[in-house]
Amino acid sequence: MEKHIKIGIGVMIKKGNKILLGHRPSKLEDTGGIYEPDSWSLPGGKQEYDETIFDCAIREVKEETNLNISKLEVFGAVDNFQPDRHYVTIQVIAHNYSGEVKVMEPTKQDEWKWFELSNLPKNLYSPSRSFIEEYKKKQKDV
């Protein structure tokens, strides 16, 4: 089997000192991404061919949360590994959003909730955890 590196986009939507996280159901279907059911995750997903980083972030957030995001910036990029897959996850921050949060893909997320950065759930999706930890570290350095 030929192995390929894939691109994922994780989006941190900020609302003051809160961020939006979605709960990944315990019976989550494996769609080929980093597979971690029963965890809390930032919105995001796989970048499609001929799609920019920001176009992917906007599309994935709309598909998953019903929100329209803007004022985007690339925060960083990291490698995420599992035994049979390798993703480069590009971390994007959305400083503005509009709309009402809704569960749009209930087989992928069964709940969306705003969390204080100082009071996050313990079972964070590992790509989201690394993004959030690095973001919090950089905020302390400023």
Image: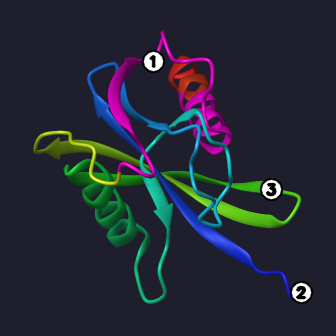
- Which of the marked residues, 2 or 1, is nearer the chain's N terminus? 2
Q: Is residue 11 above or below residue 137?
A: below
Amino acid type of disc 1? Leu
In the picture of the structure, the residue carrying the numbered disc 1 is 117
Q: CA distance from mark 2 to mark 3?
A: 17 Å
In the picture of the structure, the residue carrying the numbered disc 2 is 1
The residue positioned farthest toward the top in the image shown? 119
Residue 128 belongs to magenta span: yes
Of the numbered discs in the image, which one, if any, rests on residue 47?
Answer: none
Q: Which residues are magenta?
A: 106-135
Residue drawn at x 82%, y 55% is 82
The nearer-to-camera label among 1 and 3 is 3
Q: CA distance from mark 2 to mark 1?
A: 41 Å
Q: Which class describes the residues within 10 Å of circle 3: few (<14), some (14-19), or many (20+)? A: some
The nearer-to-camera label among 2 and 3 is 2
In the picture of the structure, the residue carrying the numbered disc 3 is 81
The nearer-to-camera label among 2 and 1 is 2
Residue drawn at x 33%, y 71% is 55
Residue drawn at x 25%, y 58% is 62
Q: Which class describes the residues within 10 Å of circle 2: few (<14), some (14-19), or many (20+)? A: few
Which colouring convention does the figure follow?
A: rainbow
Viewer-side residue, 129 vs 100: 100
Image quadrant of residue 100? Answer: top left
Question: 29 left or right of 117?
Answer: right
- Which of the marked residues, 2 or 3, is nearer the chain's N terminus? 2
